[in-house]
Amino acid sequence: MLISLINSVFDVVCICHQLFSIYRNVFVLMTRSQTDLCGRFFFQKMQPNRFEIFQTSIESESENKSTIVIVAERLSSIVRNSMSVKLKRTIAIIVVVIVSMVIENHRCFEWHLFSDDLDIIRNTTQLIESRGFRFQIHHPITQDGYILTLIRLINPYAKFSKRSIYFQHGLFGNSDNFLLSRNELLTRDGLINTQTSLLNDCSGFESKAVGQSLAYVLSACGYDVWLGNFRGNRYSSDHILLDSKLDKEYWTFTIDHLSRFDLEANIDYIREETDNSHIGYVGHSLGTSVMFQLLAEKPFYSEILKPVVMLAPVAYVSHIKAPLLLLAAYNPFFVKLLSTLQMPIFGLPSRLIATLDQLIGTFICGNEFLKPICTFFLFTLCGFDYPNTDKSMIPFAYGHFPDNTAALLLAHLAQRVVNNTFSFFDYGLEENLNLYSSMNSPTYNISRITSKHLIFISGLNDWLADPEDVESLRKQLTVKIMQDYIVPDESFNHDDFLLGSNVGKLQNSLLLRWLNAL
């Protein structure tokens, strides 16, 4: 009885506090000048030590702002710049009332309405620095004029550098995807897990002590890590002549262009920058597809890339189980529409997509009631795996996914799903004759791959790199796979290669051993 009474009193106090806060905030809003009303209010409302910069304006915004503050500033900016004075005032009041209620509920009750995890709004370089590493930013330019972004992970404590390793993300991804980890901090002694106090084992034999992020793990163990970004995403949206926000021609690329131009540009750039004749490669999902294409078309890269690590290897995709992708692929009207569109897949600029991702990660997937929906949606793409999924990582993941790409690229993937081929893009009869001298688009000849340093790591519950499709790929190869490892966990899915709670033990420890042995 006493506890119930205390809870009731606490609820009343919280509600009164909310009403008072809303009244105070509206009063402040009405009495202050129209200049930066919402921005000033939120600076007073939030605690300065919780402030952090927003991802899409990294260098220009202060390092002492929180997600809420920056969202409010941007909303107030829209209000100031595009509406009449009365409408500005009305909408600003509504914004303050709504967000005030959210903030007060978030503080008063045990369940959270949004996430205050700063990793959600950090970009690649901020994630790197927050874990004790340093970075360099490089901008290779492709032969067709796209300006890419390569981010080099620097271990300030490493006395020497081992082999350079180039990481390349998958579909709708970016370089952030290889940095999704918790509780890892680089110290003078090495990479330490701040929760368990275990020091990362660079031999790979103490599997429980190997970190979750392969990029951090390899850099901490002395490898020279480079993180790539495909054209069109938030970090590689520039061109020497075209504007990705204005010029449709920017978005006329397919999966073929990623191997023919992006991979070559990045590999050649890293080799020149490091003066190394050989570098290693780690690809995930689409990052494996484009590497198979490159090795099939230009076999001499097989001698340059040692090893070639394929996480969730994808070539054939006729057995994918992701419902949304299947519905899209088998809808002829939708595929035809995608094939004619010269625009980003989401119809929005890449940097705006980044902002929306962070809002979704913070306010939707960071909401305790809505987080299960986010988890379920991710599983419908990658495969259901509750045992290996750290639910606290879901808002973090959504803050960096999905990223932008061309509608034409997704149409290319749909063609491969329907036709069960690992083929070039099919432009139609007339254009095919011009480009390929054939009525049909040719297929990539996987049997031309000569690499003796292929490493396959695949999952049994992968809905995008289905075991049957991976087996079809194996049969097409004429070379022996150096390491062909199937993760011994029946629930291991497509996203677990990057996000799984046991990925350090199940994957990274083995890779460390294999790399050290080269």
Image (cartoon, rainbow, N blue to C red):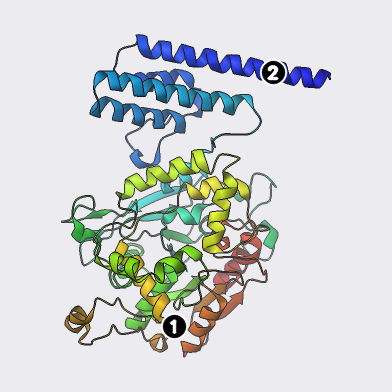
**Horizontal side, residue 336 vs residue 286: left or right:** left
Alpha-carbon distance for marks 1 and 2?
67 Å
Task: Report the amino acid beneath label 1.
Answer: Ser
- The count of marks equals 2
Earlier sequence position, callout 1 versus callout 2: 2
As displayed, is residue 437 above or below residue 458?
below
Residue at 68% over, 66% down = 205
Q: In the image shown, does 319 or 423 lie closer to the viewer?
A: 319
Q: Outermost residue, top direction?
A: 31
**Horizontal side, residue 157 vs residue 291: left or right:** right
Q: Outermost residue, right direction?
A: 1
**Horizontal side, residue 77 vs residue 134: left or right:** left
Q: Does residue 170 appear in the picture of this structure?
A: yes
Q: Where is residue 497 in the image (x, y as percent from the top left)?
A: 56, 63
Q: Where is residue 414 in the image (x, y as percent from the top left)?
A: 38, 71
Q: Nearer the viewer, mark 1 or mark 2?
A: 2
Residue at 34% over, 84% down = 443
User: Mark 1 = which residue?
Assistant: 451
Mark 1: secondary structure: loop
Q: Does residue 267 appear in the picture of this structure?
A: no
Q: In which quarter of the image is the N terminus?
A: top right
Task: Report the amino acid beneath label 2.
Answer: Phe
User: Mark 2 = which residue?
Assistant: 10
